[in-house]
Amino acid sequence: MSHQELWIAFSTIVRKEIRRFTRIWAQTLLPPAITMTLYFIIFGNLIGSRIGEMGGFNYMEFIVPGLIMMSVITNSYGNVVSSFFSTKFQRNIEELLVSPTPNWVILSGYVLGGVARGLAVGFIVTLLSLFFTKLQIHSFGVTIATVLMTSILFSLGGFINAVFANSFDDISIIPTFILTPLTYLGGVFYSIQLLPEFWQGVSQLNPILYMVNTFRYGILGVSDINVGFAFAVIVLFNVALFLVALKLLNMGKGIRQ
């Protein structure tokens, strides 16, 4: 395929994915906005006023970066896992597989669709947070790079989940039993400096901790972990998951039956 044909194939998949979640915005964009608003009210205003400062900031300021990141993670993941599994379940994926479109283009198109939804929800949550606190960006570059890489990472994770899923129940197992616990234990609501030394070490095995803290550094300028090392971890996970997802697609795992 020529470069123009590759671009047409890629942009078509991306437009389809974006149109998919914007067409039903009341189901894809509104619920996370309402959920995060409740977090701001309950944890930020009601509980936060009793907790006081954390990391040198009031509790509301401290949790806002984590809540933004949590919304990006869940929506990037959820968009791709539901979209690709639906395509596989309805056997529409066969039309793509028999076309001359390279598998890396197919994968990139679905991932970018997930990134678009993740960033859209993250932007909405950021705007909502301004009603509760002030945001002063410490490092614009770190903030954008972290949220973009995290969105790509969990879009890839959603793709891999969809490849292995055999039913609609299967696409909810990972988010329920793995993704949600890791997110809540990833430093969204607390600094790991409050934990005993042993549990600080255990927490550092959680990859979401690195994303939340790097994003918090980009906004507030504080982090529980080394930002350079965190960036390296995020990049490594992105490369690894992209190669795994592409290999599964090349093998036709869960698709060619």
Image (cartoon, rainbow, N blue to C red):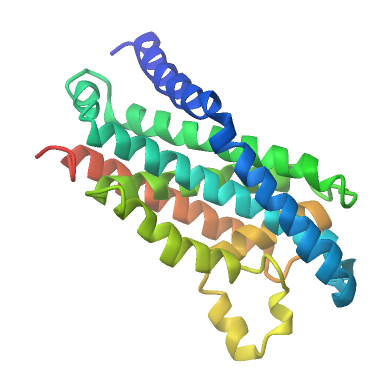
Q: Residue at x 32, y 11 (%)?
A: 2
For residue 90, which quarter of the picture?
A: top left
Q: How many marks?
A: 0
Residue nearest the viewer, comparing 3 with 12? 12
Q: In the rendering, at what x and y percent does residue 1 appear?
A: 28, 13
Q: In the rendering, at what x and y percent does residue 69 appear?
A: 64, 52
Q: Is residue 94 left or right of residue 56?
A: left
Residue nearest the viewer, comparing 29 with 59? 29
The answer to whether residue 49 is visible is: yes
Q: Is residue 199 left or right of residue 254?
A: right
Q: Residue at x 66, y 51 (%)?
A: 35
Q: Quadrant of the C terminus?
A: top left
Q: Residue at x 74, y 66 (%)?
A: 223
Q: In the rendering, at what x and y percent does residue 155 appear?
A: 46, 43
> Would you place residue 179 above or below residue 150 in this image?
below
Q: In the rendering, at what x and y percent does residue 209 appear?
A: 60, 66
Q: Is residue 226 left or right of residue 162?
A: right
For residue 156, which quarter of the picture?
A: top left
Q: Is residue 1 left or right of residue 155?
A: left
> Would you place residue 163 above or below residue 193 in this image?
above
> Would you place residue 114 above or below residue 191 in this image?
above
The answer to whether residue 217 is visible is: no
Q: Residue at x 46, y 39 (%)?
A: 79
> Would you place residue 213 above or below residue 103 in this image?
below
Q: Residue furthest left?
A: 257
